[in-house]
Amino acid sequence: MVDANTPATPVIELTQDEKACAGLAHALMTCTWWIGPLVIYLTKKESRFVGFHAMQALLWQIVFTVLYFVGIAVWMIVIFSTIALHPQNTPNTPFPIAIFIVMPIFWLFIMCAWAITLILAIMYCLKAMRGEWAAYPVIGRWARKIVGE
């Protein structure tokens, strides 16, 4: 029975360098954002194992960045629309409540996304260091297609 996390090609013995670089690609995404995985992918893409793990970390950071900027855009739209719709010349008008509602939601979204990134980095770093072809739930399939696995 073939597991979804096993490679489609014959198993080749991985070197310690390949395992370390694959794990480092996941670990670096927590502090270098997308730059660390990109550098590892570009320098070690001849190894399909390292390329696969670095591409997963890179794709996760791309998805994270897109979601982050969408969240910022929504937050800015709410702030500017609230300011534009707020009456200007009336004294003692309360501060727009929408800003107080959107800011904590946006902050919670960012903190949850960062926690998910940290959990993914730790889990898949350890799996890569053990030599496992572990794939992120959706992004793993994209990485396999890009790397050619």
Image (cartoon, grey):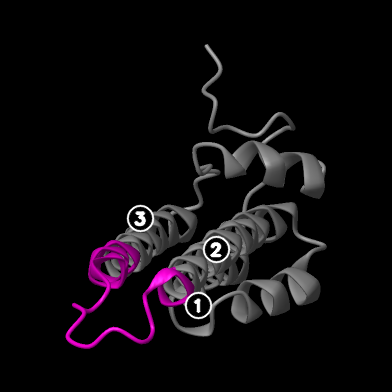
Check residue 143 for magenta coloring.
no
Q: Considering only order in the chain, which callout, 3 or 2, is on the residue closer to the N terminus?
A: 2
- Dot 1 corresponds to which residue? 28
- Dot 2 corresponds to which residue? 19
Distance in Å between CA atoms under marks 2 and 3: 14 Å
Check residue 85 for magenta coloring.
yes
- Graded by Cα atoms within 10 Å as few (under 14), some (14 to 19) or many (20 or more), the crowding at tag 3 reads some
In the rendered image, residue 48, in percent from the top left (x then y), is placed at 74, 53
In the rendered image, residue 98, in percent from the top left (x then y), is placed at 30, 65
Please name the residue shown 44% across and 66% down the image: 78
Q: Which residues are magenta?
A: 82-106
Any mark on residue 113, and which?
none
- Foreground mark, 2 or 3, reads 3
Quadrant including the C terminus: top right
Please name the residue shown 30% across and 68% down the image: 111
Identity, as a three-letter code, of the amino acid under mark 1: Leu
Any mark on residue 123, and which?
3
The picture quadrant where one finds residue 100 is bottom left
Identity, as a three-letter code, of the amino acid under mark 3: Met
